[in-house]
Every structure is written in C-alpha cells, then in structure tokens.
Amino acid sequence: MAAADDDLATMYRNAIGQHFARRDFTAEELADLDYREVARLPKVGQQGMRAIRAWLRRRGLDLRNVPAPDRQVPVPKTSVDRAIRLLERRGYQVIPPECGCDGIS
C-alpha cells in the first residue's frame, strides 16, 4: 500500500520519502526499517513516531526492533547529556571528573 494514503500526515510522508529517495514507498518497505533509523529522520519526533507506527499497525505491521515500553532510552534533557550520549554511541567512554564537583568551574 502506498504511503500516499491520506491517513499519514504529509510531513511524515515527505520525511520517509526523502529517506527512500522516492515518494512511492510501501508500508512493507517502511516496516522493514529499524525503529531508531526512522526516529532519526528529520521532522519525525515522538509524535511522528506514534503516527507512523499507528499507520503501520492499521496495516498489521510495525517497525523492526521497537524498544520495549519499560526499556525505552530516556531522552536527555541538556545539551551536555545529548553530547555524552552521542559520544557513547560512537564508542567513547565518558568519565566524570574526580574532583567531586559537577565538572563546572
């Protein structure tokens, strides 16, 4: 079923279409993508993920590797937290300062 169905918002259809480099993707093609891959698409966000997954579920599908609700990764609240998560995803180990302070001088 083509993503041009009216029940998926244009913004999300466009974001997914950019990923596939074409607008005529199918629900099956979308369901073959990893959850985190779709979550990183521009303009998707949490609301978009809910809409996309609902759209897929109406067709009996879902994304691959959807995290369990009780194990979802917490969203970092500060830019420092986001930077630390980025570094750790890239294989770096972030070590807090040994001074007993919060690292801000």
Image: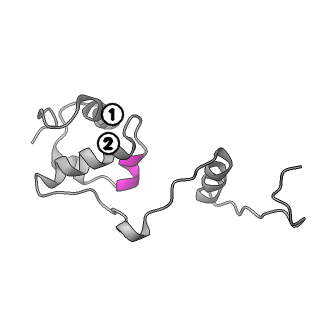
Q: Quadrant of residue 51?
A: top left
Image vertical order of residue 63 relative to residue 10, above or below? below
Instruction: Quickly name the residue at label 1.
Output: 15
Instruction: Quickly name the residue at label 2.
Output: 48
- For the residues bearing labels 1 and 2, Cβ distance under 8 angstroms: yes
| Cα distance in 3D space between marks 1 and 2 | 10 Å
Q: Residue 53 at x, y = what percent?
A: 24, 51
State how the image is colored. one colour
22 lies left or right of 34: left
Residue positioned 10% across, 52% down in the render: 59
16 within the magenta span: no
76 and 39: which one is in front?
76
24 and 83: which one is in front?
83
**Of marks 1 and 2, which one's residue comes earlier in the chain?**
1
SS label for mark 1: helix
* Segment tinted magenta in the rendering: 35-39
Residue positioned 25% across, 46% down in the render: 52
Image vertical order of residue 63 relative to residue 24, above or below? below
For label 2, count other residues whose C-alpha is less than 10 Å away and answer few (under 14), some (14-19) or many (20+).
some
- Can you say which quadrant of the picture contains the N terminus? top left
Q: Tell us which disc is closer to us: 1 or 2.
A: 2
Residue positioned 33% across, 34% down in the render: 15
Number of numbered discs overlaid on the protein picture: 2
36 within the magenta span: yes
Residue type indicated by callout 1:
Ala
Q: Residue 7 at x, y = what percent?
A: 14, 37
